[in-house]
Image: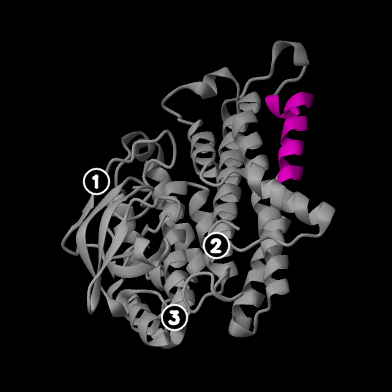
Amino acid sequence: MRTNQQPSVLSPLQAARRLAADFAETAVERDEAGGTPKQQRDAIRQSGLLALSIPTQFGGLGASWSETLEVVREFAKVDSSIAHVFGFQHLMLATVRLFSRPDQWQPWFEQTARKNWFWGNALNPLDTRTVVKTFDRWREFSGKKSFCSGASDSEMLIASAVDESAGGKLLIAAIPSGRTGITLHGDWNNMGQRQTDSGSATFERVRVEENELLLDPGPLSTPFACLRPLIAQLHFAHIFLGIAEGALEEARQYTLKEGRPWFRSKVQHVSEDPYVLRHYGEFWVGLEGVRLLVQRAAAQLDEAWHKEHALGAEERAQLALSIATAKVAAARTGLDICNRLFEVTGARATHASLRLDRYWRNLRTQSLHDPVDYKLHELGEWALNQTRPTPSFYS
């Protein structure tokens, strides 16, 4: 008897795991090469995951932030560069959603879902070298930007410039990446996150139309609009957790398959070594704590997102504290595991062909862009003085 069964449809997480398995096969070689992971970016385009966080009424998959960031974490286990630019895709979409009018962000959402647009970042509010010149019906951006993650091979950019005539106000716009006057230099060559294309860009008299400016309600204007930096922070926490989970799993496989017991241990196999077991126990405890903190923060973000303009300042502050806590824990635990994994894999695991150091290099590189010390300062202000974090692009 024949049945007409429809082929099973993969969930976003299943699709991500399938992609991640492919990415893992070339992760070591691509880490060494650097540059743009064009083939992998195109695979993500074809998967439909660029529209993961876009609501279904605009052609997207309608995933929550918890679901979207879970995919980021899945990618980070094998390739944190891809996880970074994929997460920034949804952060850029959140930026236009939170800072602009519905007649702006809705068409951008629809076109992103229909055309599989990749969004890149040229925002970097700390880099004020790009300035604005105002004309009757448009603006002009000129200057340089650093840390433009994901800008290469993107269709759209979130860019910012300083309006000196308005007292240094930051203007943010959504513009096509290929617009005349934009040059992406491809000069990212750091020790970690080597395929995020986080190099510099130059804007030479780039025309920006009024309807491309994100002015209503604008950046950080309401508690809801202030979710943007928190999404960014939680995105990084998921990357850090994913890196640590990937490092631990690769270390585990190496220990079991290649590890040798130290001659003084008096055991037959390295898996019985008491010091090796202690390290793995400590790794497990650390990761379990981070997982719970990250999951709690993601659930709280989902709740805050659904409240939209009904979100209050106090609720936003409590979310900020949860996300800061998760990020600090993820950074510290991740760096610890990525450093100490060599204590359970041994001297041969330092062979350059394995590039097991990439986990530490990636996490160390990313964690420096927003110092943990200042996150701890904010948390200390709350713990001691009950002072809420002040919303900014980093808190």
Tag 2 residue: 229
> Image check: 75 left or right of 249?
left
Amino acid type of the residue tagged 2 in the rendering: Pro
State which quadrant residue 132 falls in. Answer: bottom left
Circle 3 residue:
216
Image x and y of residue 233, in percent: 57, 57
Range of residues picked out in magenta: 270-286
Q: Nearer the viewer, residue 351 or 379?
A: 379
Q: Label 1, on which residue?
A: 185
Indicate the amino acid at tag 1: His
Helix or strand or loop: what does disc 3 sit on? loop
Q: Distance between the Cα atoms at labels 2 and 1?
A: 26 Å
Quadrant where the N terminus sits is bottom left
Q: Is residue 271 shown in magenta? A: yes
Image location of residue 33, percent across then percent down: 31, 36
**Residue depicted at x 37% and y 87%:** 103
Task: Please give left or right for residue 357 compared with residue 204 in the image.
Answer: right
